[in-house]
Image (cartoon, helix red, strand yellow):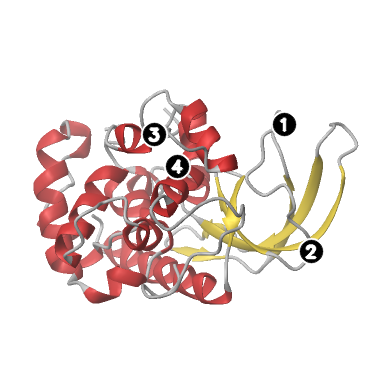
Amino acid sequence: MSEPGTPAPVGDAVRDTDGDTDEDTRGAWLFARYAYAPNRLGYCGPPESTTLAGVGAAGAAGIDVRAVARRFSGAWPYLQVLARLAGIADPLDRRIVESYWLGGGVNAQISSRAFGEELLAVIAPQAGHYWAHLTPELLDEAAGDPCFHVCGVYPWSRLLTTGAPEQPLHVLDSCRIRWGTVLSRQAAPDREDDEIVVRSRRLEWDGSALYLADPSEEKVPVAVNGLSFLSDVGPGDQVALHWEWLCDRLSAGQVAELETSTLRQIDTTNRRLARGS
């Protein structure tokens, strides 16, 4: 199990921001867009960032994203369990992928406890001694989204109280999917590509609990080495960020789902930390 640093309602259509992604491939396209950032850094999944980049940037046809996705030891079990409990045959169905990355959707239709039980049955036997915390005590926290994986399954939240919280907090904040509003776009003074100013809420630690800070501004590159998933991003856009990478535009409904699932996870994680576990 790899470790970093050592959606709209189910019935709604996903926005076709590139114009060439049809409904049959939309799930694979979304998976690539959100999975690319940690994969390119070597944190999650197989060394397939070039494959994910090709799909994420242009919806490239003929690329087997499924073979890549199956090798994500973190994300793939979530997609499988969500699909099974939702009665959807394909783990890369757009409804499953969007619900996984952004919360809501099919997550709202299934029991979080049932999801947690099935997920732990899959991932706990694969985990080593470093992951001994993957026990039924986590079921109250369980959710079919990355924020649960980041805060509950990964050990980083348990390292916040060791006296050096900076690195655990950085990983927790960077690895979750977060949302922001684009305020402006301009040429970057030290690079060929443009950069945007985004207002978002970062994750903070007050010594005993996690919380979302008041909105603050940050600069984010539109492209890295010429690659961008949102080359036409501009002021007013709501965007999703993963490891400082621009993944996609978000609707108001998707922002609400992502905020709800994030706040829920922070609350359940804080309750566990208060118990000393």
**Label 3 sits on residue:** 44
What whole-number distance in Å separates the C-alpha atoms at marks 3 and 1? 22 Å
**Which secondary structure, mark 3?**
loop
**Which secondary structure, mark 2?**
loop
- Residue at 51%, 26% (x, y): give it: 50
Residue type highlighted by circle 1:
Gly
Residue type highlighted by circle 4:
Ala
**Label 1 sits on residue:** 226
The percent position of residue 197, horizontal first and vertical second, equals: 78, 55
What whole-number distance in Å separates the C-alpha atoms at marks 3 and 4? 8 Å
15 up-or-down from 44: above or below: below
Q: Which-is-in-front pick, marks 1 and 2?
A: 1
Packing grade of label 3 (10 A; few <14, some 14-19, many >=20) is many
Q: Which-is-in-front pick, marks 1 and 4?
A: 1
**Which secondary structure, mark 1?**
loop
Q: Quadrant of the C terminus?
A: bottom left
Residue closer to the observer: 55 or 178:
55
**Label 4 sits on residue:** 35
Residue closer to the observer: 201 or 52:
52
Q: Earlier in the sequence, mark 2 or mark 4?
A: 4
